[in-house]
Amino acid sequence: MPRLFIALPIPEEIADELSTLQSGVPDARWVPTENFHVTLCFAGEVQAGAMHDLVEELSDIAGPRFPVAMSGVEQFSSGKQPKALVALVARNDRLDWLQQKVSTVARNCGIALERRKFRPHVTLARFSSGAETGHHIAQFMASHSTFQAGPWLADHFALYSSRQNRSGSVYREEAAYDLAF
């Protein structure tokens, strides 16, 4: 069963800007630029029939293109344990609308989704449990708190599959959906 997610891809020029942030934190597993995206909906492992329905039903979403911009950085953690460093996406009504639409479609296809607040971001690094980060995360946050990139025009979203290999996750675009009006 493939692991699926629906996301906005990141344009190459924005990915290049994000990659300049990726240093200075020991034990960080930096995400390759080709894996940068803004997750709209994480579906997890999905049966083939539900995947087929999802591919088809997502094509019914019709929406306008809209600008997207990056604004600042944040640390995601579980208790005191850092989990990820992320670049934040500036809040945007069109992005929220699209996220709600794709989540509704996924649920209507029988996919159980986690109920958590949508926090649009691009993951820059992940940490394993017990990672030694010391004061480096605080320095990272202070150094990059005013980071800005974009805006770019979001003209499509995509369904991706994720597979693990020895060097990490490999993402493959399964289907793309234009935002056309």
Image (spheres, grey):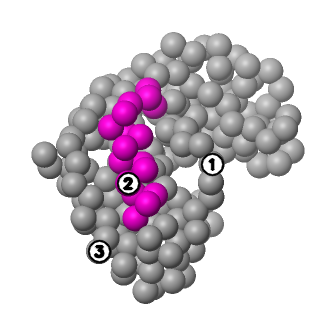
- 43 to the left or right of 7: right
Considering only vertical position in the picture, is 156 above or below 176?
above
Which label is found at residue 47? Answer: none
Residue closer to the observer: 16 or 104:
104
Q: Residues within 10 Å of mark 2 (few under 14, many from 20)?
A: some
| Mark 2 residue element | helix
Provide the residue span drawn in magenta.
Answer: 89-105
Label 1 sits on what residue type?
A: Arg
Residue 149 against residue 146 in the figure, above or below: below
Drawn side of residue 10 relative to residue 139, left or right: left
Residue 34 visible, this angle:
no
Kind of residue indicated by mark 2 = Lys
Q: CA distance from mark 2 to mark 1?
A: 15 Å
Q: In what element is the residue under mark 3?
A: helix
Give the residue number, with chain letter if any, for mark 3.
Answer: 56
94 relative position to 163: left or right: left
Quarter occupied by residue 164: bottom right
